[in-house]
Image (tube, rainbow, N blue to C red):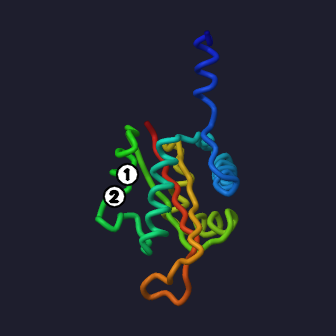
């Protein structure tokens, strides 16, 4: 029988996404450290919310914080069973690397604010690649890469 401490240690392990998402997490936590913020820990529920929205944007050919049906990111987080006191979301499209999305998020005041918000403690990050992506309305080229980072504080 596992001891309680061993069970808690297993549960405390980070929920690792793919290598690209982990590169974003490392870059986000490095930026946060430079601003005096604690590192974000990963949450499987936030990861699921991020992955679902990134996949939806890619498959349904849209880009926005609201779903095609008008659902808000806070509702996607609640639908995963995550109870929060504070929540935020960054999205991006078209950047083919973790360095590219981080560069773009850090030069955008709203995205940067979310990354450097010391009141946010957990995250979920997802990137979805859609090889046969069509250009979004008004765009000349397909985005192909859809990024979502959800931030929260329980």
**Discs 2, 1 touching: Cβ within 8 Å:** yes
Which disc is residue 42 wearing?
none
Q: Extreme left residue here? A: 70
Say above or below: 142 vs 24. Answer: below
Q: Is residue 31 visible?
A: no
Can you say whether 147 is above or below 43 in the image? below
Q: Is residue 17 above or below residue 41?
A: below
Q: Is residue 127 visible?
A: yes
Query: Looking at the picture, how far across and down is residue 120, in whole percent?
Result: 50, 44
Q: What is the crowding at mark 2: few (fewer than 14 residues within 10 Å), some, or many (at least 20)?
A: few
The image quadrant that residue 8 belongs to is: top right
Mark 2: which secondary structure?
Answer: loop
| Residue count near mark 1 (Cα–Cα under 10 Å), binned few <14, some 14–19, many ≥20 | many
Q: Position of residue 3 (x, y in %)?
A: 61, 10
Q: Secondary structure at mark 1?
A: helix
Q: CA distance from mark 2 to mark 1?
A: 7 Å
Going by the image, does 35 lie left or right of 150? right
Q: Residue shown at 63%/23% (left/top)?
A: 9
Residue occupying image coordinates x 48% and y 46%: 46
Q: State the residue position of label 2.
A: 72
Relative to the observer, which residue lies in front, 134 or 34? Answer: 134
Residue drawn at x 43%, y 36% as measured from the top left: 154
* Residue 147, percent from left and from top: 55, 63
Which residue lies at the image location 56% right of the left edge and 71% below the top edge? 130
Quadrant (top left, top right, bottom left, bottom right) of the N terminus? top right
Left or right: residue 99 versus residue 93 is right
Residue 51 rendering spot, x and y as whole percentages: 50, 55
- Tell me the residue that label 1 is attached to: 76
Q: Is residue 60 above or below residue 84?
A: below
In the rendered structure, the answer to whether residue 42 lies left or right of residue 67 reads: right
């Amino acid at each position: 029988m596992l001891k309680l401490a061993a069970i808690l240690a297993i549960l405390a392990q980070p929920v690792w996404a793919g290598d690209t998402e982990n590169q974003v997490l490392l870059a986000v936590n490095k930026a946060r450290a430079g601003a005096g913020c604690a590192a974000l820990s990963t949450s499987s529920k936030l990861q699921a919310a991020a992955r679902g929205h990134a996949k939806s944007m890619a498959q349904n050919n849209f880009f926005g914080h609201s779903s095609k049906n008008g659902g808000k990111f806070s509702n996607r987080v609640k639908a995963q069973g995550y109870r929060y006191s504070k929540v935020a979301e960054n999205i991006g499209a078209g950047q083919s690397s973790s360095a590219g999305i981080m560069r773009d998020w850090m030069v955008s005041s709203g995205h940067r604010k979310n990354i450097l918000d010391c009141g946010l403690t957990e995250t979920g990050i997802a990137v979805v690649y859609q090889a046969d992506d069509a250009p979004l309305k008004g765009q000349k080229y397909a985005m192909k890469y859809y990024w979502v980072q959800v931030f929260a504080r329980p």
